[in-house]
Image (cartoon, helix red, strand yellow):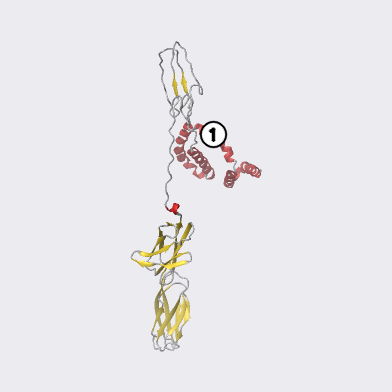
């Protein structure tokens, strides 16, 4: 053996993306009879040219970004060998790109400013408005351009497509929207508030009915009281124990928008508090969890200690709503969606507690028969 063989090599180009072709070139000792390149697990036999250099062309497969090595091996029949490695880089990442159009609402024939921001590796940025594509100009303000909306463009929404490319041909795309409007849409005005009509004063020709009582004497005493928003007034007096009253429709006219509030003048909010439903659902959920997971029963006292005071408050404060909700529960439970949930829960309970089969199986049969109706 004469020892090792000298070998060196190059990769051209040394910055590529997946799918690109590269040329592997090696310069080996004159005693070398074979030169092999190994790359990404492939073994390539290199061919010696008339200039004495060894070369082969290779297509880069789909790989991650990063630096890779080509390993070159020269050998001869005497068993002499030489090895070298050559680095190259794969870059599949396109440039970052964002774009905007100002203004984004224009009339036909008007001009728009087009702006794009791209990462430093971007070599070109273009904007396409339909079939019209133009390269944007780069300055210290970024990539800029102008576009004039055709005079015959109909009113509507449009979009511009932007594309940025780096030196390897990696491309990133984005889009920006704009609208073509008519003259009225481009200069919107706020609607004028209609004048409000003066409210009718309370009294004999407006407001709520008045209750009037008095005597035939020359002197009169009484009081006027008003409650709520109805403006209802009552006036009364006495003379010799005689009194009179005029009911609604007799002692005056009711004006527009007026309403009589009765003796108390109070209104009651009949809206149903949604959180009453929430606490009922919480109780049902608690019971289901205890049934399905009885091992959690040891922690039930903590849950109950938190919600029982609140439940007592609800029962006292909103007993009427709770009664109404309980009256509606049968309708709620018999709805198709809820029946399906109940069936699923019963099956889970039956799986965990087979000894309950005599009770649960008739219930499931009844639910199936009801669902078939």
Residue drawn where x is 51% and y is 42% of the image = 285
Q: Residue furthest left?
A: 140
Residue 93 seen in the current view: no
Residue 23, by quadrant, is: bottom left
Q: Please name the residue that numbered disc 1 is placed on.
A: 324
Of helix, strand and loop, which one carries label 1?
A: helix
- Looking at the rendered structure, the number of numbered marks drawn on it comes to 1
Give percent across and percent down for residue 207.
46, 27
**Considering depth in this image, is 215 or 172 the residue closer to the camera?**
215
Give percent across and percent down for residue 193.
43, 41
Q: Is residue 108 above or below residue 93?
A: above
**Considering depth in this image, is 53 or 154 the residue closer to the camera?**
154
Q: Is residue 85 above or below residue 124?
A: below
Residue drawn where x is 47% and y is 32% of the image = 317
Residue 288 seen in the current view: yes
Give percent across and percent down for residue 201.
43, 28
Residue drawn where x is 36% and y is 67% of the image = 138
Residue 230, by quadrant, is: top left
Residue 32, by quadrant, is: bottom left
**Considering depth in this image, is 318 or 283 the residue closer to the camera?**
318
Q: Residues within 10 Å of mark 1 (few under 14, many from 20)?
A: few
Q: Residue furthest top?
A: 240
Q: Which quadrant of the rendered structure holds the C terminus?
A: top right
């Amino acid at each position: 053996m004469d020892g090792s063989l000298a070998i060196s090599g190059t990769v051209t180009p040394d910055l590529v993306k997946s799918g690109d072709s590269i040329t592997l070139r090696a310069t080996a000792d004159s005693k070398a009879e074979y030169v092999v390149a190994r790359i990404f697990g492939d073994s390539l036999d290199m061919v010696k040219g008339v200039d004495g250099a060894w070369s082969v062309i290779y297509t880069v497969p789909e790989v991650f970004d990063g630096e890779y090595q080509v390993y070159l091996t020269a050998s001869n029949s005497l068993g002499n060998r030489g090895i070298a490695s050559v680095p190259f880089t794969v870059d599949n990442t396109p440039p970052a790109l964002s774009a905007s159009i100002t203004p984004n609402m224009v009339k036909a024939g008007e001009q728009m400013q087009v702006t794009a921001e791209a990462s430093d590796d971007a070599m070109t940025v273009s904007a396409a408005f339909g079939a019209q594509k133009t390269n944007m100009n780069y300055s210290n303000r970024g990539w800029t351009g102008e576009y004039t909306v055709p005079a015959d463009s109909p009113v509507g929404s449009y979009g511009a497509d932007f594309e940025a490319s780096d030196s390897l041909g990696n491309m990133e795309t984005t889009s920006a929207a704009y609208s073509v409007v008519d003259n009225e849409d481009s200069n919107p005005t706020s609607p004028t508030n209609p004048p409000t009509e003066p409210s009718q004063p309370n009294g004999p020709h407006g407001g709520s009915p008045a209750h009037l009582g008095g005597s035939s004497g020359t002197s009169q005493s009484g009081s006027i009281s008003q409650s709520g928003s109805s403006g209802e007034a009552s006036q009364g007096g006495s003379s010799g124990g005689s009194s009179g009253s005029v009911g609604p429709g007799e002692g005056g006219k009711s004006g527009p928008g007026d309403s009589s509030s009765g003796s108390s003048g109070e209104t009651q909010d009949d809206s149903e508090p949604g959180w009453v439903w929430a606490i009922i659902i919480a109780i049902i959920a608690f019971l289901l969890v205890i049934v399905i997971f009885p091992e959690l029963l040891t922690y039930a006292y903590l849950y109950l200690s938190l919600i029982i005071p609140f439940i007592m408050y609800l029962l006292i404060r909103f007993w009427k709503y709770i009664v109404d909700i309980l009256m509606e529960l049968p309708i709620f439970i018999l709805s198709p969606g809820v029946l399906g949930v109940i069936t699923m829960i019963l099956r889970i309970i039956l799986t965990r507690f087979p000894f309950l089969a005599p009770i649960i199986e008739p219930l499931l049969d009844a639910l199936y028969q009801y669902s078939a109706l």
